[in-house]
Image (spheres, helix red, strand yellow):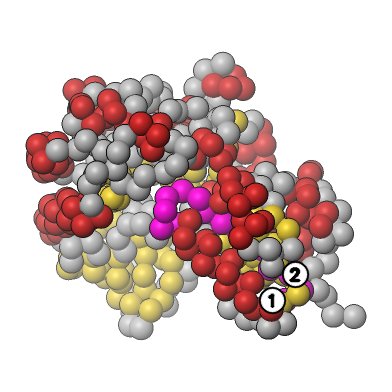
Amino acid sequence: MAKKRVNVVTMGCSKNLVDSEVLLNQLEKGKFEVVHDSNETGFDAVFINTCGFIHDAKQESVDMILDYAEAKKRGEIDKLFVMGCLSERYQNDLETEIPEVDKYFGKFDMKAMVDELKVTYHPEYIYERKITTPSHFAYLKISEGCNRSCSFCAIPKMTGRHKSRTIESLVKEARYLAKKGVKELLVIAQDLSYYGIDIYGKPQLAELIDKISEVDGIEWIRLHYLYPTKFPMDILPIMRENPKVCKYLDMPLQHISNSVLKNMMRHVTREETEVLIQKIKEEVPGVILRTTMLVGFPGETENDVEELKEFITKMKFERLGIFPYSQEEGTYAGDKFDDELTDEVKQSRADEIMEIQQQISADLNQQKIGQTFKVIIDKKEGDYFIGRTEFDSPEVDGEVLITSENELQKGDFVNVKITGAEDYDLYGEAVL
């Protein structure tokens, strides 16, 4: 008898991706044939892991559900299930609006999802995942939820309060991933800075990273999403001294104007931010900072935008992303402030910021020409092998396009001499 087939479709962030990988593994242990993000039809069941972060992401998730609801009507799939953040927050509304879905699950209903397909749930294997990224890198989610109170963010309403996983469980998962061939771990959470406080009574990110770095096979550890308020300073010596910890730090700042930061309820000032950045650069020479900014927040003035431009020009962030503000119902900002700025104004401000950042990135890349970097190979496209330095995270940062006389394999670490540069990507030759 042929195995029943299940497709898991993931929307949104890498934290959702980890949840999908756990579900895929549980169902595969239950003798299902499982695939991820397949465009095929003929599945016995499809799970859509939704995102509920901002308006555009929510709409993409709704559109995906509607597409698969139509596929179900045409008989192309049998059962349709919805999980994740959107379903966690809007389950009643979704059940009313899209009744074609067989069942809606919240974000933390793993056992119920597995039970629905008459599969035995194995909590002892929860650290195991069916890796959907290229096999040499994987995400390691160290906590759920968030205790911060940013006025624009609805995530705590979907994920609840911060809940850390134990150091022991995460080291066990890192060992499992290493045995699967993973060489690079991308450590993720809504807020890495808070890790461990709920379990150990104090921040334990440094202790966790130190323990993970002892796992054989793991060669790069990359940190995503540290909150600037109550930043865990003890991580800096580890970044400086441990060769496995990438000198790469992702710290979303959102804005720099004190008035906007106050309305955002970020609990930090421009002055404190600048002191922190200076300390990070002093403690970890050569560190690369990635940040994210949010423009168009209610009450943001032209002067606030000019201050943000001046700050970005001064700091010269190596990596920077920008988002126009999206008003979310149920948030403090959504309830208290009128969203007066038009989408056109918000996008214009975002474009102005990115124009500045594009030039900064281009200038910094030009300075890399002639230098040699350790690069991990991700894939081959046309005449080039595509890789990343320790200063580049998959999906969000630049790449190195490499020429080589010898064939390079995915997951190989190669020394590459930089020969050319574009605004965000680099060109180089493998040094063999």
Q: Quadrant of residue 108?
A: top right
Q: Is residue 181 above or below residue 308?
A: below
Q: Quadrant of residue 4?
A: bottom right
Secondary element at tag 2: strand
Tell me what residue is drawn at x 35 percent, y 31 percent: 336
Give whichever of 1, 299 is nearer the camera.
Answer: 299
Q: Residue furthest right?
A: 1
Q: Which residue is mark 2?
A: 79
User: What kind of residue is marked 2?
Assistant: Lys
Tell me what residue is drawn at x 55 percent, y 30 percent: 162
Q: Is residue 276 above or below residue 2?
A: above
Residue 51 sits inside the magenta stretch: yes
Give whichever of 78, 313 is nearer the camera.
Answer: 78
Secondary element at tag 1: helix
> Can the viewer see residue 139 in this picture?
no
Relative to 147, 250 lies left or right: left
Q: CA distance from mark 2 to mark 1?
A: 7 Å
How many neighbours does mark 1 have within 10 angstroms: few (below 14), some (14-19), or many (20 or more)?
many
Of the 4 image quadrants, the one containing the C terminus is: bottom left
Give whichever of 370, 323 is nearer the camera.
Answer: 323
Circle on res. 258: none
Circle on res. 72: 1
Residue 137 sits inside the magenta stretch: no
Of the 4 image quadrants, the one containing the N terminus is: bottom right
Relative to 320, 314 lies left or right: left
Residue 366 at x, y percent in the picture: 13, 59
The residue stretch that appears in magenta: 43-57
